[in-house]
Amino acid sequence: MKSTAVRLFLVETGNLYRFAVRFFREGFKPHYEISEFIRQCFYIGNRTLPLVAITGFIIGLVITIQSHPSMEAFGAESWLPSVVSVSLVREIVPVITALICAGKIGSGIGAELGSMKVTEQIDAMEVSGTNPFKYLVVTRVFAAMLMLPLLIILSDTIALYGAYLGVNMKQVVSFHLFTNQIFEKLTFGDVLPSIAKAVFFGFAIGLIGCYKGYHTKNGTQGVGMAANSAVVAAIFVVFIIDLVAAQIADIFHIT
Amino acid sequence: MRTGTKDLPSVICIEGLKKSFGKNNVLNGLNLDLKEGENVVVLGKSGSGKSVLIKCIIGLMDLDSGNIQVFGEDVPRFSPSDLDKMRTKVGFLFQSNALYDSMTVRENLEFPLRRHWIKITKKEIDDMVTEALTSVGLAETIDMMPSELSGGMKKRIALARTLILKPKIILYDEPTTGLDPITAKEISKLMVEIQKKYNTSSIIISHDLNCVKITSNRIIMLIDGICYATGTYAELSMSTDERIKQFFD
């Protein structure tokens, strides 16, 4: 029983790897599906923007409120903006945003391609002279790779505003002073790894969603399973990428 | 029904087609010949490989061995661009219609045009869409979404999408499945009208005996992965062979 599960996991990983290789092979070969790529960027951005914005604001606010007592106990209240901003920008916001996107985008792509697969729309596309892999997969993965960093930058900004409000709940700090304190400690080395890993988060979320949807079986039941497993696998891979990124940043002293 | 197509040239010629899925041998050396202007119905039990057959012809599935020739050219040797060229001449009507549900009827019909004929003006596209929709009697649905259409309307729109490239051959995968008897009869008659109007040749996969009777010039019985018997509807329905009789009883 255990060995079957391990075998299935390895087979699935191998298939996903082959799918990724095909993505790189087809993704950079003309002709490019530019209009579909732009449409997907709009959908991915538009679909997740409100959720990411609200979540970013709440995270910024909550992290600041919860950090305040500890900082106060050490007499380091004035450090609150810089400490909170570094933890938000480097880790919390990118990961939370990626998890939201894994749920929203991963499941959306998995269900959409899954339903196209079971209703033969992907075959119809092929018969209509379109390479469905290029049209459906390449555009969605590239769109996710572009939109994730943008969503994370937006979420960072909103989270920092939330943090500003959180700081002002216990003390009075001007916006000017708050931003000065943030940019005193927050360096390019904090922002760059977060943006770089966002690109990989986008790649993983897009690719896994497409892979699960593109290989859907067993009719409508399979569509639900594809959407569900796309989310679970994407969340798992987001954490793995985060761990690897933290190790790489540590090795190269990007701090 | 038109008969006497023996002297006409073949548009599809299949020799010794074999296809298996794991240990399940679906097609076991099938031979089939489709003449110009002919409607051939492939009749067989569920899972007998009828849909597999037409998916191999259009290049959606690879065959294990044998050969398929479309207009005298070997399909298994086609490059992706050759397949695209061939698919402008061979239309495919999917069992599930396969209409793109995120697109309007107009966009569904425009899609194959834009993909195959990149250099085409907006006016030409509009004219072709209107002509295809008119030929299936649904010009008024042009801006509707597939979810707003009934089963019969979806089938007609799918047929219009297949027709828009003016194919010489049409492959129908169970065109009347899931439709009520009246709509199924309308679709069957429409298929015959299309054959007459555009002089197409067709392979039709069907279980529906009414559809078979209306549309077929010739029937092929697909049993055990081979062409077990062939003949007109009248000939096969009179057969004394038990395996053939069970389809017509």
Image (cartoon, coloured by chain):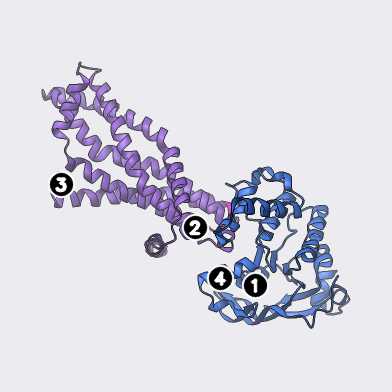
Please state the extent of the stretch shown in magenta in the rendering. Answer: A214-220
Marks 3 and 4 in Cβ contact (< 8 Å): no
Q: Is residue A35 left or right of residue B114?
A: left
Name the kind of residue labelled 4 in the image: Leu
Query: Is there any visible trace of residue B60 in the rendered image?
Result: no
Residue that appears at 63% across and 79% down: B69
Q: Is residue B106 magenta?
A: no
Q: Is residue B220 left or right of residue B53?
A: right
Q: Position of residue B181 (x, y in %)?
A: 82, 55
Q: Which residue is mark 2?
A: A214
Residue position for label 4: B83
Look at label 2 and name its amino acid: Tyr
Mark earlier in primary sequence (3, 2): 2
Real-space CA distance between mark 4 and mark 1, rounded to the nearest whole angstrom: 16 Å
The N terminus of chain B is located in which quarter?
bottom right
Q: Whole-Å distance between the Cαs marked 3 and 4? A: 51 Å
Q: For this view, does B35 lie left or right of residue A220?
A: right
Q: What chain does badge 1 belong to?
A: B
Q: Quadrant of residue B26?
A: bottom right
Q: Which residue is mark 3?
A: A254
Image quarter of the C terminus of chain B: bottom right
- Cα gap from disc 3 to disc 2, whole angstroms: 38 Å
Q: What is the CA distance from the residue labelled 1 to the residue labelled 2?
A: 23 Å
- What is chain A's hue in the picture? purple
Give the secondary structure at mark 2: helix
